[in-house]
Image: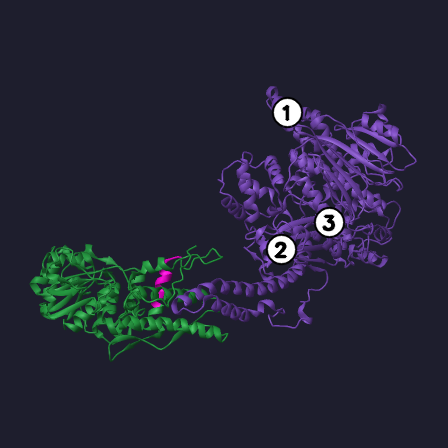
Amino acid sequence: MATRKPIKKRSVPATATKKKAAPPAVAKRQAAGKKLAKSAEAEADEVLDVTGDEAAEVDDAADEAPAGGKSSGRRATAQSMASKQRDISVSEFFAKNRHLLGFDNPRKALLTTIKEAVDNSLDACEEAGILPEIWVHIEQTSTDRYKIGVQDNGPGIVKKQIPLIFGKLLYGSKFHRLRQSRGQQGIGISAAGMYGVQTTGKPVKIISRISPKKPAHYYEIQIDTKRNEPKILNGGGEGVDIAYGEKGAKDIEKHGIEWVDQPHGTRVTIELEAKYNRGRGSVDEYLHQTAIANPHITLHYTDPEGSTREYQRAADKLPPEPKEILPHPYGIELGRLAAMLAEAEGMSITQFLSTKFSRVSPAVAKKICTTAKVSPRAMTRKLGRPEAEALYHAIQATKIAPPATDCICPIGEELLLKGLYQVVPGEFYCAATRPPSVYRGNPFQIEVALAFGGAAATQNVDKELLSDLLEETDARTIRQFLISTFNGLGSDAADRIMKAAALGTRQTAKQLKPKEQERLLQAMQNVNVAEGQTMEVMRYANRVPLQFQQAACAITQTITSTNWRSYGLSQSRGGMPKGPVYIMVHIASVWVPFTSESKEAIASYPEIQKEIRLGLQAVGRKLGMYVRKRQRVKQQGDRRDIFMRYLKEVATAVHELNGVDRDNLYGQLVTVAKRVTADADMKLDDRGRKIKEEAAETDYGDNVIIVDPMTHAAAIKRGPAAVAVADE
Amino acid sequence: MAKKKLTPVAKAPKVKLSPRDEKTAERLTGLADRVVTAANNRKDPFVDIPSRTLANVKYSPKKKILEMGNATNRRQLFDLSQAKAYMRTMLVTSGCKKLIDQGKSTSLRGLFYMLKHTIEGVKENTFDEQGECDTIIEDVEVLLSSIREELHLYAENRGAMVGGIVLTDKGDEINCARMGSGGYAIPSIVEPDVIIFDKKRCTAKFILHVEKGTVWQRFNEDRFWEKHNCILTHGAGQPPRGVRRMLHRLHNELELPLYCVLDNDPWGYYIYSVIKQGSINLAFESQRMAIPEAKYLGLRSIDFERCQLSDSVKISLNDTDRKRAKQVAQYPWFEKKPKWQTEIRKMLSNDFKLEVESLISKDISYVTEEYVPARLRDQDWLD
């Protein structure tokens, strides 16, 4: 049940049998079959649909019609229009509508390109059973041009497939199967290549080696947008072989690319018009979040300034291999059903139903036939449209077991915690993996992890980084800069930082004097931004971080519609909860329902929202227990603070009144204060009763980490206030 | 951060304390001794402050004044919501002691500045606003049953008097019949050690108290006090303690009847009620201030018709006024007086209020030449 758009290529392991891709037209029709009501997508459908029939070419006709209308009185005749009506290639369509694929602006283009390449690499490695190691290199070639190189240690790609995978849109192995993978459609990397060629004229350069015994292949490819075909530029249309070792290395250098020598693997190099930024929605953030959700990968990242960051793998085991499943009857659409019926050769209807779908036994198939009033032994090719429709309705009316859910591979609570703990500073971590569930016949699974009490991003910045950030930013004012650069920093907190730094609201970010920068840094360290800080949400689909269209995403919507107040966080109605909280939500599915091709937000199916909510509530309850307990102890501590504050004043006043020894009296009062607030030193249970040491731990259930925030590695720069407390 | 000098109490006082001051100082020190005792016994120090709320105020039908009940509020040092208030109480106590020891007095604001400083180690002030300090001072007054004067504190002078009386103020002779247009400003402390009356040197036969300075000016300019042989006072709205105490002393020591000319609105009624019975907040001072025999001369709700005033002088009642009027009507000391009930009902049914100045619409001196003399002549007043 190819519900949606085309697929992503690559990741065909050299050993695997090649799967034949459907001709583009079929893919298009399939794509037209079912859709989500997103306007961009609706537009795409319309145009794609048109290509199938001999309908008008909407764009061109509209553009040129007025010219034709001058002489004839009518603007155009059926004949004159017919002469302009022709096929639109997918590549042409996407070249015009690049925003549908995530190439709206130079900044996003860079991210999308890297994202597509990395996702493909990871899929390929995992499918081949190799622990992934990825190299990402971004290099600035001129003011607005960047060359990106992404290499993996995957299985490599056979020579013949390379041009198709990188030079043809809608070509791939993932679209026609139901299996949990990062890529789905076969558009991504070829679209990135196309974007690169369009903006810089430089071809896509690919090196791939499938075995240490064979030479690597090197191709330079351009996509022919008219025909949606790859055009090989080097080696007379054949590409060149690159030998192993010394000689090969020289060749590679000659071609202006790089290659980390590996027995097998692939490297793609694309030069494109782009813009490099840090902060929200950046490449850095994407790689960072990818590392959290994929603890089994090693990542080497060289940014445009030449500094290298390494993410070492925290787990030495690959996630279990996801199984491919047959479509479930509930998820099928009428059009798709008719197409499948037409394709199935020489099968009885019972056979067809029980072999092409999951969870349909011959008995169930018979039941469906009876309900549809179709003979169970009728041959599929003899069935017409009316019978197909009857079958379709019969399927909906028949009770069929939900699909098998063992095809889903969640990250797992343990690894989620590990990933989060390593990257996000905090004092309380917990995770929950929901049991698998089903939406529209597609199995999926929700995972939620939460970190609480981390130091704010503003406090982890040093002087150099700050001046770098200030230089790079697009923001016009300092305030804008603070809000857009630091995740979760609300406008409130930004204002407080500005006030503390005594900077004007309208001051330009780039023109800060060194002294002002110093003040800004000071303020960032000292202002308690946790006050008014909003929850930080990291969204993942099949281990891929989602960075844009936060508001349109089912995950965000579910978070804001969940009541967090009962878990000890403050939240305004329908808003993000407040507080130093990081939350990570992962949806794993054989088919993730995105709202658009650029795969930025998850569609709001009620089944999915329900599971997300249950997951959020599971971690929320644990958070609530922790927060309440912490508050209780803190209240006692605060109480003592308040008393201590006034004791000296009282002692002084009494001394002035009756001449008693001030320090002695103060000492005595402090003793009383300690006795009165002894609870602060005492462990309390959930209901606030005093309890003995043995039973001191609240039962949070499994998969919870509680750390002393002072000892957390990521909490080193917590500002002077924290240090002062630690000293006591 | 204001560093406080530790003035050793043992050192010989510069000033010879009067017996009254000694008594007050003793009470203040007693408060400190209780802290020491509590600390010695590892106990939580506290003070029991008589509660100054409506619930703890009783109207004594016999004495016809408001009296304070026995209820107290315990203020503890080791209670989260009271710790700061307790600390402030001790600060005010020590501040007053210092004033007494040095034989000086200061204004309420002066004491506020004397005690205001930043608490050591935190960015918090002992006091942020004068209001916070004033409340604590009242607490200390009731706590020690020492009045403000005894704590060497005074408020701003407010209110004025003029009339046929000669008095001595801190040794200076003041002839209230020769005070020009401004009158004699009534000080906030008018206790016998400051102001001395001489019955023989008082020719006035009664006191006429008006609400505001502007009305008082009218009466003074028309030499009303001369023609009718009285003392003319005003309290600038709600009369401060100095004025009330002065009226009380004039009334009791010189046996002068008191008549009030106030606005015809709930606020005017309330001023009368405070002069007559005492206020809720200062119920502990009613004994020294309330004048149950005070009479309400005007303005009355019937005056609009009686004096044939024009429509333009009406000021319509607002919701607060109506609410307040109903409250006043329910005060126990008004509740059983049919005349007062009629008066308030009449105002509510009029649905407007009248200021004393509204009589000027008749004639500039209508109030001094006709209105008040007529009322006095006919003995037409509310009690």
Vertical comparison of B132 with B41: above or below: above
Whether labels 1 and 2 share one chain: yes
Disc 3 is placed on an element classified as helix
Mark 1 → mark 2, Cα distance in angstroms: 61 Å
Name the residue type under label 3: Ala
Mark 2 → mark 3, Cα distance in angstroms: 20 Å
Chain B colour?
green
Quarter of the figure with residue A658: bottom left
> In the image, is A560 to the left or to the right of B256?
right
Q: Is residue B131 magenta?
A: yes
Residue A314 visible in the current orientation: yes
- The reply to whether discs 1 and 2 touch (Cβ–Cβ < 8 Å) is no
Looking at the rendered structure, the number of numbered marks drawn on it comes to 3
Task: Report the residue marked by disc 2.
Answer: A453
Residue A89 visible in the current orientation: no
Task: Report the residue marked by disc 1.
Answer: A64
Say which label, 1 or 2, has the lower sequence index. Answer: 1
Give the extent of the magenta segment: B128-138
Dot label at residue B168? none
- The reply to whether discs 1 and 3 touch (Cβ–Cβ < 8 Å) is no
Q: Is residue B89 magenta?
A: no
Say which label, 1 or 3, has the lower sequence index. Answer: 1
